[in-house]
Image (cartoon, helix red, strand yellow):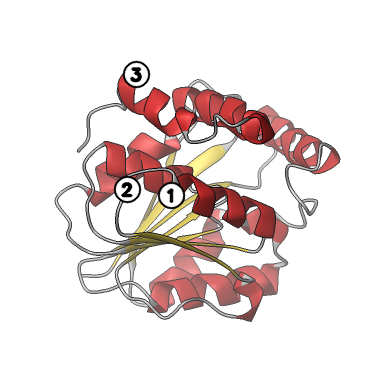
Amino acid sequence: MTAPISPQSLRRIARLCSLRSKRWERCYTIVKLRSDPVYAAVAQELTGSSLPVLDIGCGIGLLAFYLREVGYTPEISGFDYDRHKIACAQSMVARSDYRGLSFTTGDARHGLPETTGHVVILDILQFFTPDEQSVLLARAASRVAPGGRLIIRTCLRDDSRRFRITVAGDWLAKLTFWMKAPPVCYPDRALFESVLGAAGLRVRLAPLWGATPFNNHLIVAERA
């Protein structure tokens, strides 16, 4: 399951966005899956597991489709407050032969789906206030099963050039309407160690830059 996604798999996912009305999503899919290291990193963390996955802030569902293409077969649930993106994910599933994938609309500030297994949060924490970040992390941690992992990709707040580039990229996403909200607050390392440690999870952090200029880090919190 840890092998990079094949060109055939990339084309198979992109074709799900091949209708004229989905041209932007198709271009986004191709570029994102080719260039972003987070999908392979998440797949690596899930290797050998049979637990279901909850993807908070799933967007158009690319992580779920990627995991299916690299051999992850347990159920995957996507959750996002952007109705347009959820509708896109649902239509992609309807045109595919993927099984065990579901996508629902909801705001993580008001609660999470009742599920237990692995939890994934990619690139959304900066849109929450510090208090909201703490609440979301605590709720997500409560959904992690024994042997499960909470896998997070986020920009960490610091004084680096990478951090400044990441902030500019998030504002560009807002100005082009790909993201519905501007960034609010970027978390720091101490947040994860305090909140997730208090929830009984063992936490590790590592840079996840890949070939990008962004200040992204992978945070993995595991329940023994």
- Considering every residue shown, the one lying at the far right of the view is 175
Identify the residue position indicated by label 3 in the image. 7
Tell me the kind of residue under disc 1.
Val
Identified at 23% across, 48% down, the residue is 72
What residue did someone put label 2 on? 98
Q: Secondary structure at mark 2?
A: loop
Residue 81 seen in the current view = yes
Question: Residues under labels 3 and 2: Cα distance?
Answer: 18 Å
For the residues marked 1 and 3, what is the alpha-carbon distance in whole angstroms?
20 Å
Q: Which residue is mark 1?
A: 93
User: Residue 123: in sight, yes or no?
Assistant: no
Residue 178 bears which disc, if any? none
Residue under the image location 75 percent in, 39 percent down: 173
Looking at the image, is 200 positioned above or below residue 60? below
Q: Which residue is at the front of the view, 3 or 126? A: 3
Q: Are marks 2 and 1 in contact (CB under 8 Å)?
A: yes
Q: Are marks 3 and 2 in contact (CB under 8 Å)?
A: no
Residue 89: horizontal and vertical position, in percent?
A: 52, 50
Mark 1 crowdedness (10 Å alpha carbons): few <14, some 14-19, many ≥20? many
Amino acid tagged 2: Tyr
Q: Secondary structure at mark 1?
A: helix
Question: Along the horizontal axis of the image, is 109 left or right of 172?
Answer: left
Q: Residue at x 52, y 49 (%)?
A: 91
